[in-house]
Amino acid sequence: MPEIILNNLNFILPELVLTATVLVIIVAYLTNRKDETIVYYLSLVGLVITLYALTGKVGENLSAFDGMLSIDPFSLFFKIVIVFSTIVVVIMSQHSDEVKSEKNLQGEYYFLVLSMAIGMMFMVGASNLLMMYLALEFSSLTSYVASGFTRKAKDSSEASLKYLLYGAFSSGVMLYGISILYGLTGTLSIAGINQVLMQGSVNSLALLISSLFILVGFAYKISAVPFHYWTPDVYEGAPITITAFLSVASKAAGFAMMMRAFKVMFVDSSLVTLPVGAWGFVNGIHLQQVLIVLSVLTMTLGNLVALWQDNLKRMLAYSSIAQAGYMLLGVLVLGNDGTAAVMIYFVVYLFMNLGAFYVVMLFANKIGSEHIDSYKGLGRKSPLLSVALAVFLISLTGLPPTAGFVGKWMIFLSLINAKMIGVAVIGVINSVISLYYYVRVIRNMFLRDEERMSDETFKFPLAQQILLVSLLIPTLYFGLFFNELVEFAQFSVTMFGVK
């Protein structure tokens, strides 16, 4: 028995490294509160070691802890996205005036960020509904606290409370759906549930209700309409670093968990009439139609409401909702092509979205505002940051030669291959709509002058410029050279669900 436990612990070595880092941070913070930079460096070192530990898991495809976790290329892909996002957010935090303003709380801050990352890493590998729920709750509970970290901001506590209330409701609905599904199948293992469903002895109506309830929990985590109401308020009230983290890493974990649940639980592996790589749901499950409605509503509402936003953080919040809608287009294809497209999109989304939030944070440090009208004339005051923000926004729109174009093209291509032309057209129309509110920011920076003209120019430290360029280069690079990324995603999804 001890040998089995040690072998299982070796399977989750990256998660253990990150957990040890959290414990070290707590001890270092309690023993030395004078030098708060030590917890920053400890966090960074722990994350780099975790990333290195993940490289040792390449090619592994097995189960751990009696089927509770899957250690496979699919989970590895998303763990890399989550850890890399965490590294960027930790470095961003060192440059954030919001975070630094909360003195004597730096230890708690990095504890929360790394704890969220641990929960997300378990989410992407969870192969049991109980494990999925526990990992989701662990990530969510730390997110509630982190979103209200800036106590001096009036809207921070409100954002945290709204996040908690919406999260508690959706988690409760999801747990009820899990209980129904357990009553129907007698197991919480997603592979075991699939075996029972394949026998065709489960009540179709109860199965549909339970699957929809479980979908509510996933939809809340990825900010899909109509479970998106928490997103604008939380994104606006939370520190920009936490907002950026939730928009990328949390969304990635939610999508990974949802795709694994759908692929393993509800796909009928006995269907031989489908093309290679395509999925077909078992009888009684009609989630594809539900996903079509969810994706269309999510990207349409996100883009339309973003048109009226004057606060840049709130605009990016609705933009993030719309981006979730685009990613859902890849999920509803129900095939390896669509899943790989979502994975590719998350990599490029990591760079362009974190980059956009980073520029907004740096400008907020200087001008003390996130209002779009405050960006007038910034192209002259800070050319590098303004050009970088323009590139990130163009990439979010999906225009070439940026990485955002590749991400959206792969998703639309998977829809076309699946003969879902109408849905693809709706996605393209939404991308055109999004161009308006992104261009509005670019216009203010380069074509509008500030009300009170001044010759002041903004200077930013070299470390901030290096991080900015580090996010900018991949946004342009993957727009031109993306073959390796596509191959990695396709390999990861090909091994997905194969043990």
Image (cartoon, grey):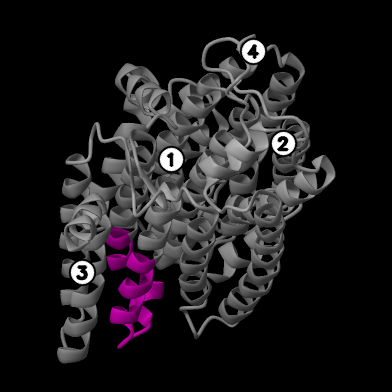
Q: Position of residue 314 (x, y in %)?
A: 62, 58
Seen at 59% across and 66% down, the residue is 234
Is 318 located above or below residue 399 in the figure?
A: below
Circle 2 Cα neighbour tier, 10 Å, few/some/many (<14 / 14–19 / ≥20): some
Q: Residue at label 4? A: 416
Compare marks 4 and 3 and give the one earlier in the sequence: 3
Q: Which residues are magenta?
A: 90-115
Q: Nearer the viewer, residue 114 or 169?
A: 169
Dots 3, 2 in contact, CB < 8 A: no
Q: Is residue 439 visible?
A: no
Where residue 403 sits, quadrant-wise, is: top left
Instruction: Say which quadrant the N terminus sits in.
Output: bottom left
**Mark whose residue sits in front, 4 or 3:** 3
Q: Nearer the viewer, residue 13 or 270?
A: 270
Q: Position of residue 311 (x, y in %)?
A: 62, 59
Is 413 located above or below residue 209 in the figure?
A: above
Q: How far, Cα to Cα, is label 1 from label 2?
A: 26 Å
**271 to the left or right of 212:** left
